[in-house]
Image (cartoon, rainbow, N blue to C red):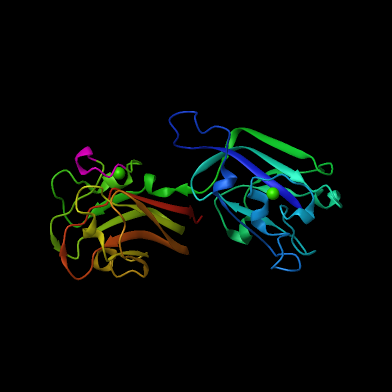
Amino acid sequence: MYFLLWILAMPIFSDSTKDEGRNLALYGKATQSDLVKNPWAAEGHASNAIDGNRDTDFYHGSCTATEEEENPWWRLDLLDVYVVTSMTITNRKDCCSERLDGAEIHIGKSLHNNGNNNPLAARISSIPAGRSLTLKWKKGIPGRVNVALKSRATQSSLYGNGFAFNAVDGNKDGVYGHGSCTHTQQEINPWWRLDLLKKHKVFTVVITNTLDSIPERLNGAEIRIGSSLDNNGNNNPRCAVISSIAAGFSSTFDCEGIEERYVNVVIPGRKEYLTLCEVEVYASPLD
Ligand SMILES: [Ca+2]
Ligand SMILES: [Ca+2]
């Protein structure tokens, strides 16, 4: 399969239309089932389809190619939650444009079967050599979802107005006084827990630190994910240790598709306050 690809999409939580029509593929991450022949050559790499260059001559090094194989695939991770409203695919010009005939576009939030089991969004009958095909979806097709927004949060104790649900209010504002961050009392092993309400396949957890309420307090915190409530869920397996997150910034932690219900953030082994300004959990429900 030899082709180039563009995706235009609009973020779900956008409060304006300024992002409409932005080519999000340029900011995503591409991979594919296999790389054709010489990996040290410029030709064929998955990222060539999102390099912003529509050059259709394969040997100019801006097209992708897999080996000839059963069910070859190419995948784009948009790295965030978007509704895909349109997608443009450019075919190779210098030969064999028919190889793309019958290719399917699947869009969704699951990585099962490398994402190829996600809902079918479109099927390409054929694209003439060197030409581009634009597909449009009027209502849009959602990708990975931040399930934290629909989950239940609690924490070891409360300080002031730092309620547990402030970390899942969809607002990453790191200024503590703006009322969108959590805050426990100063105590040994302070923790915050999210109940996803049922088992999910958890891919990534994104944590936003406070801008002005002593960001260093979060250093050494652990993300623990599991299905047990022993020790308030803090004994569940560890997905990551937060060494530090710069003031007001967000860090992403890869939890490799672990299948569980509770997500904890705990600062082990010292008397500390725990503050989180937002916790996003990108996951798929297990039915
Ligand atoms: Ca290209
Ligand atoms: Ca918040």
| Residue 233: quadrant of the picture | bottom left
Measuring 82% from the left and 48% from the top, which residue is drawn there? 101
Q: What span is in magenta?
A: 173-179
Task: Tell me the quadrant of ligand 2.
Answer: top left
Residue nearest the viewer, comparing 137 with 19? 19
How many numbered marks appear? 0
Is any atom of residue 232 visible in this view? yes
Q: Residue at x 75, y 38 (%)?
A: 133
What residue is at 13 percent from the left and 59 percent from the top? 186
| Spot occupied by residue 19 in the image (x, y as percentages of width and height) | 51, 33
Where residue 25 sits: x, y (%)? 59, 46
Residue 174 belongs to the span the image colors magenta = yes
Residue 99, image x, y percentages: 83, 53
Vertical position of residue 233 compared to residue 55: above or below: below
Task: Report the side of 146 relative to 176 (left or right).
Answer: right
Front-most of residues 65 and 179: 65
Image quadrant in which you'd find residue 112: bottom right
Q: Tell which residue pokes out farthest to the top in this image.
A: 17
Q: Quadrant of the N terminus?
A: bottom right
As drawn, is 204 to the left or to the right of 121? left
Rendering coords of residue 219 (x, y %): 26, 63
Q: Is residue 135 above or below residue 280?
A: above
The front one of 28 and 48 is 48
